[in-house]
Amino acid sequence: MKNTIEKALEKQKAQSKSEPNENAALDTREKVETTDTAPQQMDDNHKERNIKAKQAPSEEPPATKKTPTRAAKPFHIDFERLAENGHVTLGGERKQINEEYREIKRKLLANAFGPLSKTLKNPNIIMVTSSRPSEGKTFTATNLALSIASEQDKTVLLIDADVLKPNILRTLELKPRKGLMEYLTGDVEDISDVLYHTNVDKLKLIPAGKSHHLSTEMLASYKMHETVDEFANRYPDRIVIFDTPPLIGINESAILANFAGQAVVVVEEGKAKIADIKLAVERLNPEMAIGFVVNKSVHNDTDHSGYYGYYYAERSE
C-alpha cells in the first residue's frame, strides 16, 4: 500500500516537473512561428506600400521650363516730330540736312566696306564723340543712323554708350527702357533683351540703361569686349554707331575708342577751342580713321532753309 502511494506521489511529482518544459516548448514554437511569419508580413506590407506609391500621383512639382524671353516692344519713332526738330527725314526729300548727311555717310561707308577697311580694326564700328559736352554729338549720331538706315543694302545699330548722361532716347523722344548697363551688370541675360527694333526696318537701338558707379569697369570688361566683337563680325552689312561721352575728362570715352575703327569728332563752330580739339584727338586710337563734323554752322542758302551745316574732313597725318 505504501509502495503504491509512494509510486503515485512520485508519478505526480514527475508530471508537475514535465509540464513547464512542455509549456516552454510550446512558447518556443509560438515564438518561432511568429518570427517566421513576421518577414512575410513585412514583405506584404512593403509590396502594398509600393503598389500604393505607384498608383498615387507624384507630389513633387514637375520641373519648370525656362520661359523664353518675350520680344521687347519695338520703339516707335515719330519722324514728323524729328523733322520739325531739324533731323534727317526718310521720305526722300531733297533737304539740305539730308544731303549733308548723305555726304558724311559716304565717307564712313567707304571706310567700313572699301579698301581701307582691311587696314582698320572693326571698321564698321563708328564712335561719335566731341571734345566737350553740348557740341551736338548725339544729334549727329542719330542723324547718321537715320541716314544710313535709308541705304538699300545696309543695316545700322545705334547704341547709347554715354552711360553717364544718356541722351539718345530723349533726342528721339522715346521713353526710357533697360539697356546696355543692365546687360553688363547681369540684370538681363542676353544682349538681345535690350536690343530694340524700331519702325524703321534697318534701324535698331540699344539704350544706355541706368547709370552705374562702376560704369568704367563695366565698359572695360571682357563681357563688353565679347559683345563688341559680335557686333563687328556677326552681320557683314551692319554699321554700329556708338554715341560716346565727350573725350576730355571722361575715362569711358577713351575705353570705347579702343573698340571702334572710326571716330567722328563733333565740333561746335564758334565754341570749340583748337587746344581742346587737339587734346581730344590725342585720346583716340591713332590707328582709327578720324573725321570731324562742324556742327551749328549756319549756311546762307538761296532757299533760306535755316538748317545747320555739317562737314566731314579726314584727319591729315
Image (cartoon, rainbow, N blue to C red):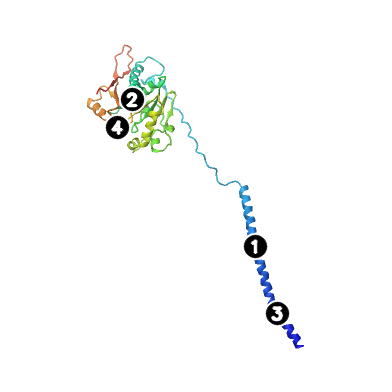
Mark 3 lies on residue: 14
Q: Is residue 45 above or below residue 150?
A: below
Foreground mark, 3 or 4, reads: 3
Quarter of the view holding residue 195: top left
Q: Nearer the viewer, residue 43 or 162?
A: 43
Measure the C-alpha gap from mark 4 to mark 1.
87 Å
Mark 1 lies on residue: 36
Q: Secondary structure at mark 1?
A: helix
Residue 103 in picture, x, y percent from top left: 33, 18
Foreground mark, 4 or 1, reads: 1
Instruction: Specify the amino acid type for callout 2.
Output: Lys
Residue 281 in picture, x, y percent from top left: 26, 27
Measure the C-alpha gap from mark 4 to mark 2.
23 Å
Instruction: Specify the amino acid type for callout 3.
Output: Ala
Q: Which of pointers 4 and 1 lies earlier in the amino acid sequence?
A: 1
Mark 2 lies on residue: 118
Q: Is residue 36 above or below residue 262?
A: below
Measure the C-alpha gap from mark 1 to mark 2.
90 Å
Q: Is residue 237 left or right of residue 302?
A: right
Q: Which mark is residue 254?
A: 4
Q: Which of pointers 1 and 3 lies earlier in the amino acid sequence?
A: 3
